[in-house]
Image: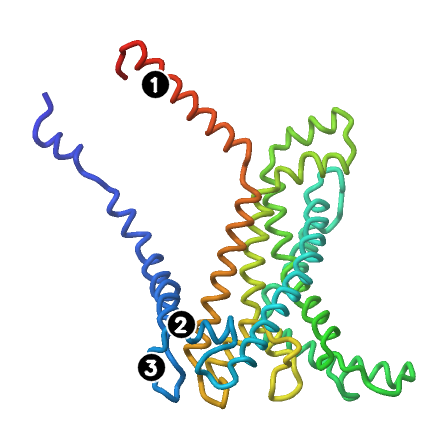
Amino acid sequence: MASAAQRRIKSISYAKYGYMFIAPFFLVYAFFQIWPLIYTFILSFKGNQSNCGAWVGLDNYTTIVLGQGLAPGAANIKAEFLQALGQTFILWFGNFVPQILLSLLLAVWFTDAKLKLPGKGFFKVVMYMPNIITAASVAALYVNLFGDSERYFVNSLLMHNFGMEDPIKFLSTPWPARILVMFIQTWLWFGNTMIMLMSGIMGINPSLFEAADIDGANSSQIFFRVTLPLLQPIMVYTLVTSMIGGLQMFDIPYLLRTGAQYSKNLETVAVFVYANFNNGPANVSNYGLAGAASMIIFVITAILGSITFYMNRDKDEIAKKKQRKRAEKQYKAKMKQGGLTL
């Protein structure tokens, strides 16, 4: 029989030390993520700075969604928000598609054992480097390259060396400005996406590639029949994280300008929120309107993320779970009919 000291030693639990180690992360996350989200939700029901943030209920939401509310120029606010939302999706989709295609191509090349590419490590570092450059630096670089007037590099080159008479309005014309933002976002993030896809490919069992090679499959067949299906989890993760980042796109569209005012052709929802939070309609900061816009884009992101996860769920695993549940029910029913208890 165990002594009292032995029983006391066995009853000691070290789980509390694990909670102590992970507590700082959850505290920081709650302070910097959960509480701001809750406070933004509360702000969305309040008015602007002129009425000292009085409670206005759903007025901010009706202003943005229906164009009806107490805010000055409610119809214009709705039109501006819808334009910003449309431009946000255009800018995100326009940089995500080339980014994922380029990253997937490079990831397959760099992980293919049959391709003896020299200097793989060097190229990986070089391709990832744009991701660590600050957005302000990148925006300043491209503004000086593609500014609207003759004194900026590209226009100066075209006018002095190729005989062009008038400068191209890269930043003030809608589609050239959007294409420039798409290119910058692709250039900034394709290296990060490439690294994630490489990690997914390297996590696939090499014996699967060897078996496909022995069976006579060519590179295209191996990619579409082995690599791509097994990359689905990391592809879904990349899609969702890219969508979240794309719908919150702020820095490049806001900073890509030559004057004091940001370009309306590049206004995203995040820029719309920032503009209203600092200087809303009638030059009055409207915290409530900014909070409502933030919550709307949060709901849109959550819905799109849920749809993405639902469409890419493992159907085979779901079918197996349903089959196991049916088998359990049938077994229990047979046991009851036989007069036996589990």
Compare residues 237 and 295 and report the one nearer the observer: 295
Mark toward the viewer: 2 or 3: 2
Looking at the image, which residue is at 43% across and 20% down? 327
Q: Is residue 124 left or right of residue 284?
A: right
Specify the label residue 54 is tagged with: 3
Can you tell which quarter of the image residue 136 is in? bottom right
Q: Are marks 2 and 3 in contact (CB under 8 Å)?
A: no
For mark 3, give the secondary structure. loop
Where residue 98 sits: x, y (%)? 71, 57
Residue 326: image quadrant is top left
Instruction: Estimate the spatial distance between the alpha carbons at disc 2 and disc 3, rounded to whole Å.
Output: 12 Å
Eyeballing the image, is 97 above or below 168? above
What amino acid type is highlighted by mark number 3? Ala
- Image quadrant assignment for residue 90: bottom right
Dot 2 alpha-carbon crowd within 10 angstroms: few under 14, some 14 to 19, many 20 or more: some
Q: Give the labeled residue for mark 2.
A: 58
Q: Amino acid at mark 2?
A: Leu
Query: Residue at 63% of width from left, 46% of height from top?
Result: 198
Q: CA distance from mark 3 to mark 1?
A: 60 Å
x and y, in percent, of residue 69 in the image: 45, 79
Q: Nearer the viewer, residue 181 or 133?
A: 181
Query: Where, quadrant-wise, is the N terminus in this rendering?
Result: top left
